Structure formats: C-alpha cells, structure tokens
Image (tube, rainbow, N blue to C red):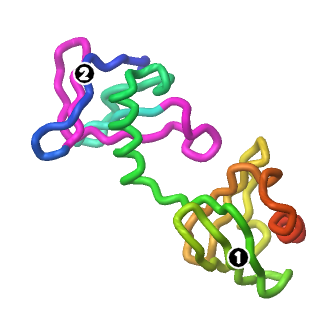
Amino acid sequence: MTAVRPEALGRDDHGRLVLRLVDGSVHVGCVPVRAFPLSAPDAALSLVGADGHEVCWIDDPRALPAEWRRILDEELALREFAPRIERITAVDTFATPSTWSVDTDRGPTTLVLKAEEDIRRLGEGALLVTDGRGIGFRIADRFALDRRSRAILERFL
C-alpha cells in the first residue's frame, strides 16, 4: 500500500481510534502496528482496520501533528510490552541457564537466560534478551550501560 496521510485521527466516545482518510473513508477501531518494532521502532507504521487489513501506511510518524503522535504512542504502549533493561545487578552463574537480576524501566525483576542465543544483536549496540518465559527485554545501547552491567553482559556475548 502506498503511504497515505490521514486527514484526521482521534478517538470516538468509546475511546476507539478513529481514522479519516483524504478520500473521505472513516475507519473506527484501527490499530497501529510498527513496521520494524525492534530495529526501527520510531520509523514507519501501519494502521490496520478492525477487519485486519491495512488501511493506512505512514512512512514517518514523526511528521504527523503532535496530538496524532501522542494518540498513536498511547495505542502502541497498550499493545507492546518490552521492558528496557537499565542495569544488570547480578547473575547466579556465567553458564546457561542462568538467572539474572535486572533493573528495568518498569522496576526490578529476574529473568532466566536459557542459552546465549537468546541474546539477539539488533544493531547500533541494541540487544534483545529473551527470557525463559518468552518475554523480550530490550537493551537500547549496551555501551551506555554502567561498567558492571557491561562486564556481566560481555560474558554472555
């Protein structure tokens, strides 16, 4: 689908996302979906209609009006759960499986790393650590972590 700039984006009385396109069509209950949620989370996204089909492609959400971006960010936050690791406080062993104690942007927690392969490099120093329950924890920039966290992490990379 070619990129389409919405004419209007807002919410109805029930809190559902409402999209009106330049052609006059109105789509209630749209859901934003990131094109590249891990490697380029701020890049292109699609608005998918209630029927599951794409109704609008947005190349650069940053070019949208601030109110529209705020609404889309709220919707995406409801759909996505990817805590960001800010610090690795301890590991029980440097062999796998190992239990990590970490501080995230959502508070402290523990995760079980089953194998070194559960740490994926996303580029630009970003990592995705998938724990034993299948939850993906992001590290935005491994080089920006504190020295102790970097030292622990290097043992697994």
Is residue 39 magenta-colored? yes
Residue at image position (24%, 28%) is 19
Q: Nearer the viewer, residue 133 or 151?
A: 151
Give the magenta-colored segment's residue range. 16-44
Instruction: Tell me which residue sits at (21%, 23%) in the image.
Output: 20
> Which residue is denoted by mark 1 in the rendering?
113
Q: Is residue 81 left or right of residue 71?
A: right
Which mark is on residue 8? 2
Assign a secondary structure to mark 2.
strand
Compared with residue 134, is residue 60 higher up or lower down, i.e. above or below?
above
The location of residue 48, given as percent across then percent down, is 32, 37
Q: Main secondary structure of the magenta part?
A: loop
Q: Which amino acid type is marked by label 1?
A: Leu
Residue at (89% x, 67% y) in the render: 151
**Residue 157 appears in the picture as rendered:** no
Q: Secondary structure at mark 1?
A: strand
Is there a contact, CB below 8 Å, between mark 2 and mark 1? no
- Placement of the C terminus among the 4 image quadrants: bottom right
Q: Looking at numbered disc 2 in the image, what kind of residue is underneath it?
A: Ala
Query: What's the CA distance linking mark 2 and mark 1?
Result: 45 Å
Image check: 75 left or right of 104? left
Q: Residues within 10 Å of mark 2 (few under 14, many from 20)?
A: few
- Give residue 30's quadrant in the image: top left
In the image, 117: left or right of 5?
Answer: right
